[in-house]
Amino acid sequence: MSVKDFVQQRRDDFIAMRRDFHMYPEPAWLEYRSAAKVAEKLIALGYDVALGAEVLDLDSRMGLPSEDVMKAAMARAM
């Protein structure tokens, strides 16, 4: 199946995902909900997905919100 066909067959799903992401915006470094939803879709398609500390040097991040803000965002995402 071509990429074009794949996208066309799932057009409504992609539109729903975009609307969902816009309904629940997440600030930088706090995209827990969005990342989880994308990972879930990719896993369902058979991809191996790595997240968080598996793919990111946590000590290299700059401009992070406070620990309390990060914990609150993670709790909302669950």
Image: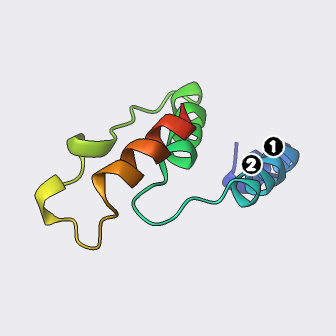
Give the x, y percent position of residue 49. Answer: 39, 36
Circle 2 residues within 10 Å: few <14, some 14–19, many ≥20? some
The part of the image, by quadrant, that contains residue 57 is bottom left
Q: Residue at x 83, y 54 (%)?
A: 15
Where residue 5 is drawn, which disc sits there?
none
The local secondary structure at tag 2 comes to: helix
Q: Residue furthest front?
A: 68
Q: Residue furthest left?
A: 59
What residue does disc 1 label? Answer: 13
Q: Residue at x 74, y 48 (%)?
A: 17
| In the image: residue 51, left or right of residue 36 | left
Give the x, y percent position of residue 48. Answer: 39, 31
Report the colour scheme. rainbow
Q: Can you say whether 58 is above or below 78 in the image?
A: below
Which amino acid type is marked by label 2?
Met
Picture quarter with the N terminus: top right
What residue does disc 2 label? Answer: 17
| In the image: residue 74, left or right of residue 26 | left
Which amino acid type is marked by label 1?
Asp
Observer able to see residue 57: no
Nearer the observer, 18 or 43: 18
Give the x, y percent position of residue 54. Answer: 22, 41
The part of the image, by quadrant, that contains residue 64 is bottom left
Spatial distance from mark 2 to mark 1, Cα to Cα?
6 Å
The local secondary structure at tag 1 comes to: helix
